[in-house]
Every structure is written in structure tokens, then in C-alpha cells.
Amino acid sequence: MDVKNKRTIVLLGHAQSGKTSLAESILFHCGAIARKGSTLEGNTVSDYNWDEIERKSSIGDSFMSCNWHTIRMQLIDTPGYLDFYGEVIAGIQAVDNAIVVVDSASGVEVGTERAWSLLEEANIPRIIFVNKTDKEGVDTEKIIDELRTVLSKKAIPLGLDNGDALTEVIAESDDVLLEKYLSTGNLSAEDIGSGMHKAIAAAKLFPIIFGSALQDKGIDELLDVVQQYFASPLERPPVKMQEGCVEFSDSSPFSALVFKSIVDPYVGQLSMARIFSGTLTANTQFYNISRSDSERIGHLFFLQGKEQRSLDAASCGDIIAIPKLKITHTGDTLCDHAHPVVFQQPEFPEAMISASVRPHSRQDEEKISQALHKLTAEDPTFRVKVDPETKEMVVSGLGDLHLHVMIARLKKRFNVEVDLGTPKVPYRESITKTVKAQGKFKRQSGGRGQYGDVWIEISPLSEEKHFEFVDKVFGGAIPKNFIPSVEKGIKNTMAEGIVAGYPMVNLQVTLYDGSYHDVDSSDMAFQIAARLALRKAVMEAGPVLLEPIMNVEIAIPEEFLGAISGDLNSRRGRTVGMEARGKLQIVKAVVPMSEMFTYGNDLRSMTQGRGSYTMKVSHYEHVPSKIATTIISHYQTHHKEEEI
């Protein structure tokens, strides 16, 4: 197909606005399917995964294609829940146009606002489809006012009495037309037609179309606007590049971006790629510049929901699935080796919530790492790590729903069952006083015995210094060859913790005296003696717990500042700064890590889904005594039970 007749379109909008129903209506209207499915019956083309059918809502991007008169459309149906926002980001990367679906009863919701912001950044042409207008009491004027107020003044309804407003927006989008309009007060029908195409394709005019996906109302009008006015791949705005530039055409050197991966239960991994220039032929190879290596390919597919349609070749503007790639991952650039280009990788949001993962059985423990790795390959917003301090496996995502969907997939696909819990906080132990103590280990049980005797002094160190060992033994009280044994015993005991089982920090240990036995002294005896001395000294040196404090940046609309400030105070947080960034206020705060595990969900609730945040470890501070006492008491009780 000629590139100028291709249209790539992403369907965006808040959850339950009717994107999947609209996709189904478009496919039926274009003759791509013989019968419309519904989300309630679980038989739509795009929501085909078991969990989407079960939940009656989209979870991941799905791909479809159909023809309308002279054009071929490739559609991406995206989820509306903010827990799956990464799918929206991936979908926008792959297309030239968008249809933003708005529920006529609910109006502009947060999912719509956030998707619109991404489209604005990418300068993507878009149509607003106001859905469910078959319901009683729909106030079209109110909806139009809200769309123009919240989304854009350049959102103009088609088919209503708006000729003057439409003409003005078209004129303002082109200098030549504006001059003509200002001089004559009007534009010809030909000027309006050509100007409308330029304005919509340049994202300077956003047509509003009213309809009902379930009743197939407004679909003809929508498809005609897509055909006449949406951008072809040749007209899309320039793509953000890290290296080189791309000329959009079939005859240019090959270039593509892998924007998503799908794990198919039968074929394995499918790499979804958008071709920006040139042609890719089946059973050949391409150069993956992101991995600095070439990779052979076998089949190429168009996807129609879960159905895979084989292709001999694909070219500029096509969205294709490539199976069984070995080195290629989401975000990689594919290109002609002789004409290197690198696309900017998708920027996915930081995780908003974390949970610890504990397998049900030893068998599950052996399978879990590989299974979780496959899930992260499919969803870049799902993160997995093993905390080096707490030794816990921690999964992170964009919300509770996101994590529970991924854990359900873990069980369904890989037969691995796990429990989710609150991650452990990597507390530290330290001291506040200088203390001297003796540690003496003596054991005689026939034959060679064990003997080690040390005197140490412990003192607090500044935060910059983790540990310092000072040897001040004189006169051979402890032989030189046992000094390293003492230091090793000290370090091992610090790593284990003493009052609550957490590593000790900010500690200076001075070894200043001791004694030994010519026969019974050994490396192990002095390690144990050092352990005994340190444990005794710490318990007398005003032991304290330290907790990690996070630097937190929270982006919110101004009307939520009061609620956010009050909530931060309740979390023992401190606001340290504030600044405006576009339409948002950025609140900078320091908050204990232990108070932040559920913050993603709480922030979403407080801000109606409009808030987001990032955080990273800043420093450690003393845990308040009341909280520290509870933590220490719990450890001591549990530790005694283990010893018993």
C-alpha cells in the first residue's frame, strides 16, 4: 500500500470510556469482522487475554487493522487505568494519530488528561470522540465547554453550528490562510478543506465528533475524518532522535523502533516494531544498533488481536510483530548498518508501589526468577530486584492493581504462586556513647582448648565514615597474627546487628589490650572474643536505630497542596521546597522510607489520580524512640524464639 494511504492510530481515554467498544465498531464498520463482540461477553478482538476477559477491561496494548475506502488503518487499543500507563506511553510512540475517547456522562477524566498531555508533548494529531451519546440527558454544550476548557481551545465540534469558530481556527493554523481571512473576512470551501487537513495533521485543530460505539452512531463520520484529515506516515512530526535523522519514506534506509514486547503462549516473545523508514523483508536480517549486533528474522506479522497474519515484507508506517528475537528488547533501534540512527527510548514512569515476594514452595523459588524476568520483558513499568541488604525479592509497579495482575499472570502462565508483603526497611544500628568492654572466650574440653581475650573501646563516627578499626595493642599482649582475627570478628558482628538484627554503621573500634595462650589461642577464638566484646560494649553505648530518609518530589495541581502538606506531616515528613513547573506544583520533601510504601495509591486517591512522585535515598536519621522500641522488642522476641 502507498505510504500516503496508511493511518496509524492509538485509542486513548479514561477507563470505561468505551475505547475497546469503539475499536470493535470500527472493525465491524470496515468489514474486518462479521460480528461485533462486547467486553461484557468477553469476545472482542482486542481484549483477548484471560485476565482482560475476566476483568472486562483492557490491561495491555492490542493491535488491529482494517481498510476504509482508500486507506488502511492500524489501530492500537490502550488500557485506561493509570496502573497500566506504560502501555499508553508505548502506544503513542508507535503512531501518527490518536482518537481520544470521552464518556459523555463522565466528561474529561484524569486518564484522558494525562494521555492528552503525552499527545501534546509528541505533537500528535487527534480527534475527540464523545462516546455514549445515546444515553438520556446528554448536554452537548456542556461537554464542548469542558473539552475546550480542560483540553484545548482548538477543540471544535464538527456538524454543529460552528462555521465561524472552525474557520477561525483553520485560518490561524496557516499564515497564508490567515492573511486571506483577515483581508476578506472569509475562506472558500476549497481553502477550508485543504486548510482543515493541514490544521488537523499539524495538531492545530482537534475535531469533536459525537456518537455511540455500541449503537454504531458517528462511526461513518469518524472514519471519513480519519481518511481525509489524519496524518499519513509522510506527514508525521519529526521523531525524537538520539543520533542521526530519519526521512519518512519507503525508499529511505530502513529504521524502526521496538516499542513493546508481547509474550505469546504459542509463539513465544513477539517484538512490536514501528517502521519509520525503508522496508523490512521476512527471512532476512537487520542491525540492532542498541545492541551493536545483527539479528536474523524469520516471519513478520500484522496482528489482529490474538490472530497473527503473515507478511512477506513491511515498510514505512507499518506496525509489525517479529517473533523469537534473541537479542532485541523494548526500546531498541533497528536500522540499516550503513545508515545508523538511534531513536529516543520510551520514558516509562517510575514505580509507585512496591511489595516483597515470597514463593509458596522450594519448587516455586527455583522458577520465580526466570518467570519474573519474562514479565519484566513484557512490561517495563514492572520492576524486580533482590534487595542486597534485606535479601528480599521486591516487585514494583504503578499501583495495587498492576502488581496483582502481574502476580496473577505469574501463577497462570508459569504455575508459580507467591505471597505479597510489605518490604523490609533497611534500618541501621549505631551508638551514641564511648564505652570500653572486655570479651573473653575460654573453653577447655580435653585436648587443645580455645582461648582469646580482647579489650576494645567503641566510639560514634560521623556519617561519612562507616567503620574504622584502630590497633593500639602494645607489648605483644595479642600477637600480630591474631589482630586481623579481632577485626574480622568485629566486622561480622556489625554485619549481623546486635539490638535489632540490622547492620551497624558509624562506628570506631579501638583494640587496646588483651591476652593470649601459647597453645589454645586461635583465629576463631579471637573472632569469638571480639564478638563478645562488641556486643557487651554496644548494649552500654546508647544503641540507636537509624532509618533511610527519602528525597521526594511530588508533582500535583495547585488545588491539592493543602492535602499533600497535611499528609506529609502525618508521615513524619518535612517539606523543604516548592516550585512551579508548567501547570503543576512540585513539592520537595524528605520522608522516612517506612512511611512511603503505600504512597503511590494514597497520592492517587488524594489527587483524583492527577499526582505523581519520584524518590531516592538521601541519608539516614535516628528512628524516634517509640518506634525504635517496637522494632527492637519485636526482634528480641523473635530472636529468642529462634534460639529456643
Image (cartoon, helix red, strand yellow):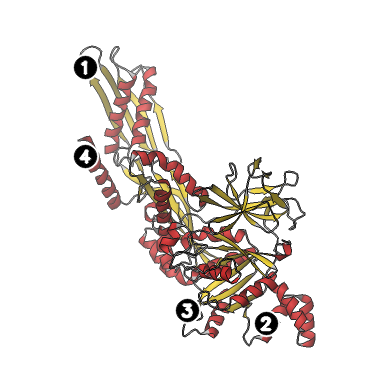
Q: Label 3 is placed on what type of residue?
A: Ala
Residue 42 is tagged as: none
Q: x, y (%) of residue 323?
A: 58, 47
Which label's residue is closer to the chain start, 4 or 1?
1
Q: Label 1 is placed on what type of residue?
A: Gln
Question: Does residue 631 appear left or right of residue 132 in this picture?
Answer: left
- Callouts 3 and 1 close, C-beta under 8 Å: no
> Badge 1: few (under 14), some or many (20 or more) residues near its Cα, within 10 Å?
few
Numbered-mark total: 4
Q: x, y (%) of residue 559?
A: 47, 72
Tell me the quadrant of the picture where the C terminus can be found.
Answer: top left
Q: Which residue is mark 2?
A: 166
Q: Foreground residue, 552 or 396?
A: 396
Question: Does residue 47 appear left or right of residue 459 in this picture?
Answer: right
Q: x, y (%) of residue 309?
A: 60, 55
Which label's residue is closer to the chain start, 4 or 3?
3
* Mark 2 to mark 3 CA distance (whole Å): 25 Å
Q: Which tag is nearer the camera, tag 4 or tag 2?
A: 2
Q: Foreground residue, 127 or 245?
A: 127
SS class, disc 2: helix
- Callouts 4 and 3 close, C-beta under 8 Å: no
* Residue at (29% x, 40% y) in the render: 499
**Residue found at the far front of this picture:** 34
Q: Which residue is mark 3?
A: 105
Question: Does residue 561 appear left or right of residue 358 in this picture?
Answer: right
* Mark 1 to mark 2 CA distance (whole Å): 99 Å
Which label's residue is closer to the chain start, 2 or 3?
3
Q: Label 2 is placed on what type of residue?
A: Leu
* Mark 4 to mark 1 CA distance (whole Å): 29 Å
